[in-house]
Amino acid sequence: MEFNVKSGSPAKQRSACVVVGVFEPRRLSPAAESLDKVSGGYLSSLLRRGDIEGQLGQTLLLHNIPKTLADRVLLVGCGKEREIGDKEFKRIIASAVGRLNETGSLEGVSYLTDISVKTRDLHWKVRHSVEISSESLYSFDQLKSKKEDTRRPLRKLTLMVPRRSDLPNGEAAVREGTAIAMGVSQAKDLGNLPGNICTPSYLAKQAKAMGKLYSKLKVSVIEQAQMEKLGMGALLSVTRGSREAPKLIIAEYQGGKTKEKPIVLVGKGVTFDSGGISIKPGAAMDEMKYDMCGAASVLGTLTACAELDLPLNVIGVIPTCENMPDGAATKPGDIVTSMSGQTIEVLNTDAEGRLILCDALTYCERFEPESVVDIATLTGACVVALGRHASGVMGNHHPLIHELLNAGKTSGDRAWELPLWDEYNDQLKSNFADIPNIADRTAGTITAACFLSRFTQKLHWAHMDIAGTAWVSGDKKGATGRPVPLLTQYLIDRSKG
């Protein structure tokens, strides 16, 4: 969908539909008041009759309002004006866009950016209008033989700003929102594909296609034979039971100076996780196609980065494979040697994400990075700890962690820091190897991060556990595209110095 910004009076907009807000109880927003004045009190008379209360998410579609140029006017309930925060604004925009898409209005003009949102400025409201609108209209129907097409879908949305002097700010916000929405949609599409299509080879092909699309993005793929030469025994131990060859995708975005240290994003790409010999229960095992959402988020973030032409050097490192049971599969109790030289006792083959990540993190050392962030659907324990609202963040460099947390607050893609104290490391002990791949049942998210910390001592590193945020289950099952907004915001913040 196309987005742009404009400034002007609502009564003078020649549009299929003008969108304005109504606060509870029955009070017009500034743009709605302007329309009401021009139309001789038409809107206020409807409110007095009780046609709309202004409750959050309510909508009322009107036609042929006197002395206005728009074909339709959509009133959108915004709830109580002083209680509008991020969550409420998202509901307002989603309700408006959903209703617009149903009306047959091919385009619309939205004045919902004149609503006050707690602690948020115009730039945030415009950018998030774009992101929320795109999210509301997203659907994954590529694999359906019969698609439920909207007859006259919404194709263009104009977001209004108060003054002409606000246009440059608004245009920058639209550009950011559009780039992030593209990255989120890409991450969703990859996550929603089934494991028989989205294989490690498929991910590698998608990354290479991105390299052809963006001149500043160079993509290479390390194959299994080279991994063996590099000594990536931990990564290779995961893929032994699969007929799909593993890949290590390296995507280098060169937007900064040649000698400028890069930011590295490492994404877990297990395209299907059966648990291996430590096989998972059958219920909801189909959702293990989402175990590559860390990889998808890295590719989505690189897309947003390239679309914004950020003046940074960013490298995506994606270890991708399947974890399947087979006669050749790694067994509980097996000991493997990682690229770092550390030996690992594999006590549970379903704790495979940390095994592919540890070799990828060691590989990152060659880039001499400014910082490294790994993103992984790593532990069910993170869902227990934080639910599906926040991603878990841990690491060895507090400034980096704070940057990520602040990016989460700005983007609305929230994260929460968990402790990575030395005491938790004491839970990782093996009688037969340097380190086991699991500890006891307590603090599973943290001990998984402790495991990774053994391979990041030369790096400024943070770990994001997105097991609770990468997808949703139930009737609305699907990938969320998180944490593309957080990661992109982190890179935007870094680009500004």
Image: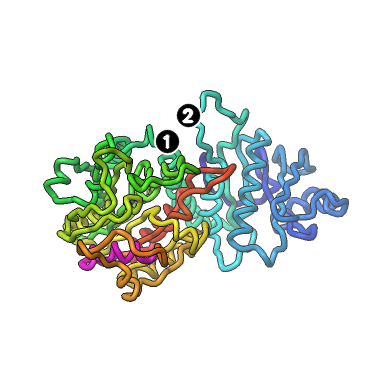
Name the amino acid, label 2: Leu
Q: In this view, does 92 lie to the left or right of 398?
A: right
Q: In this view, does 328 lie to the left or right of 43?
A: left
* Above/below status of 194 relative to 54: above
The C terminus sits in image quarter: bottom left
Q: Where is residue 367 in the image (x, y as percent from the top left)?
A: 19, 57
Q: Position of residue 80 (x, y in %)?
A: 72, 63
Residue plotted at (65% across, 47% down): 95
Viewer-nearest of labels 1 and 2? 1
Viewer-proximal residue among 186 and 432: 432
Is 459 magenta? The answer is yes
Q: Distance of mark 1 from mark 2, alpha carbons?
A: 10 Å
* Residue name at image x 61 percent, y 63 percent: 85
Q: Are marks 1 and 2 in contact (CB under 8 Å)?
A: yes
Per the image, label 1 sits on a secondary structure element best described as loop
Magenta-drawn stretch contains 273: no
Instruction: Report the amino acid beneath label 1.
Output: Pro
Which residue is most to the right? Answer: 49
Mark 2 Cα within 10 Å, few/some/many (few <14, many 20+)? few
SS of the residue at dot 2?
Answer: loop
**Residue visible at 24% across and 63% down?**
435
| Residue marked by disc 2 | 143
Of 301 and 192, the residue lying toward us: 192
Say the numbered circle drawn on residue 194: 1
Question: x, y (%) of residue 419?
Answer: 39, 72
Region rendered in magenta: 445-461
